[in-house]
Amino acid sequence: MASSLLLGACDAPKVAQENPGQQSGFIESAAQLGVVYNHDAGLAGAYRMPESIGAGLAVFDHDGDGDLDIYLVNGGARETAQSNAPVNRLFSQQTNGQFVDRTVESGLGDGGYGMGTALGDLDNDGDLDLFVSNYGADVLYRNDGSGRFTDISEAAGISAPGWSTSACFLDADLDGWLDLYVTRYVDDGPGRSCTDSAGRAEYCGPNTYRGLQDLLWRNLGDGRFESAGAASGMDRAPGKGLGVVSADFSGDGWPDIFVANDGEKNHMWVNNGEGFFEDQALLMGVAYNAFGKPEASMGIALGDLDGNLGLDLYVTHLVRETNTLYTSVGNGMQDSTGRNSAGADSMPYTGFGTVFLDADQDGDLDLAVANGRVTRAETSNPAHDSSIDEAFVIDYGEKNLFYLNEGDGRLVNACASAGDFCKAALVSRGLARGDLDGDGDMDLVISNANGPVRLYRNDIPNKGEWLKIRAIDPLLGRDAIGATIEIQLGKRRMMRPVTHCDSYLSASEAVAHFGLGDATKADHIYVTWPGGEKEHFSGVASGQVVTLLRGQGKKPNE
């Protein structure tokens, strides 16, 4: 039996359901828990494109007290010189489970026209730093410990003009320092005017504008970053990027990058290990859908949906397009949307944020999708006395979607048992997951464009056992971003990636959550570390958070 070193293994506190016998599924609890916030898109009747795109968030432990906090990215007037422009907000969780606005104390109140977030420990000091993408100048915050952040954007050298959207920290060159990939959208200046089929003012689509080149910032290890776009080859393929994830898709130990492009072919940047990336999206089967057509790709869910120990991608799209499921097969992927109801079922909707999670903890991954239109619904007819904010929700609001996994990767619509999650029609954008109440299951947070934040507490009944695992590289003092963790239950194995990046404009904690069903322990744990090294750790009991240290397991041949 292989040995294991388990640090910080502890029983998570059990939190009783607040509505026993009354409600189940995902229970909306934001205001009840003190998270009172309304995103401001800066609506002024001009139908500027950024109004319909933004509203990201991050769920992470900002102050190192062991519970999760919520960071919400705001929009507001595009002329950021206004003194009363809205700012991003941080809600810090207290010991009683309530949240308190700590924006001022944290220093995280950026006043730019916000888009999304990325999380990563850029200086290897053990706490999470924060990147905020903007319509305009991006911002990089260094976590100084105990909940205080410093804006180091200028000193870090990450300044670049343009419109940034989703972003992801990854160690692209495996030198131990997390680099930063930033997707960028379109050059929408000067602003243009568009109309719908009825001649009403409408948001322009991305085909109206020129796409921008994404950015790769290489971490120099001294607090500074340098542009690696030209050296990496990524500056040769501009796109209209909205979503990004990173993992070793090619199986060679090096992190690759998948980018969801809006209305154009997606990118799959395969890392050659020498600082150069080649776009192999077409070769790997993820550039287009099964019909060879580009789609309006936006959000990305990353995980092993079908249980074959390969990473799959679920990509959200525009109304009248299916959301697309790419499943791993051999050395590439295939469009498996046709065998899944989460494809055709999504056609009436416009999807943005999306995540895989084992909501019922039965051992397979389920799916949540945040919806909200970017073109006015044909049946929309706001009352003449509706305010501009009310009309925005009536015109563009949609209900969300939730699916349960049948056990073989097939998803079935489970909105009927999802509680509040699929009920409200809002303009949903960002979606993040995390165990907010410390009871072991995954809760959800959604940021809505020009609308209220929604926090959905997971009160699904009769859930299975659970286990949460962190993979730490002690030489770096941080999560081993890019690793994968497998657990074995009898003859069954399941795998989760170690990443902060997925969904849309959003970031979540890099803790691998496993539902165990009826099993009360994991028999074995296997970690594939960045670079491809593998280790085997002995089994552990369910119902706890376990930390595995690189170098403390057994090699496969031992």
Image (spheres, grey):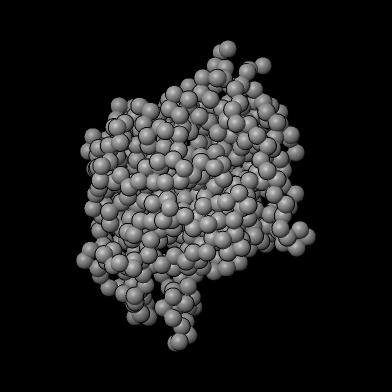
Q: Position of residue 464 (x, y in %)?
A: 72, 43
Residues 516 and 310: in front is 516
Find the residue positioned furthest to the right. Answer: 21
Mark yes or no: residue 328 visible: no
Total count of labels: 0
Q: Quadrant of the N terminus?
A: top right
Find the residue positioned furthest to the top. Answer: 558
Q: Position of residue 113 (x, y in %)?
A: 33, 61
Classify residue 325 as left or right of residue 21: left
Name the residue at 46% across, 83% down: 386
Residues 301 and 282: in front is 301
- Considering only vertical position in the picture, is 465 above or below 462? above
- Considering only vertical position in the picture, is 345 above or below 332? below
Q: Position of residue 428 (x, y in %)?
A: 49, 62
Classify residue 201 as left or right of residue 25: left
Name the residue at 47% across, 77% down: 390
Name the residue at 57% across, 68% down: 424
Name the residue at 58% across, 64% down: 31
Q: Quadrant of the C terminus?
A: top right
Mark yes or no: residue 75 visible: yes
Residues 144 and 484: in front is 144
Q: Position of residue 356 (x, y in %)?
A: 56, 47
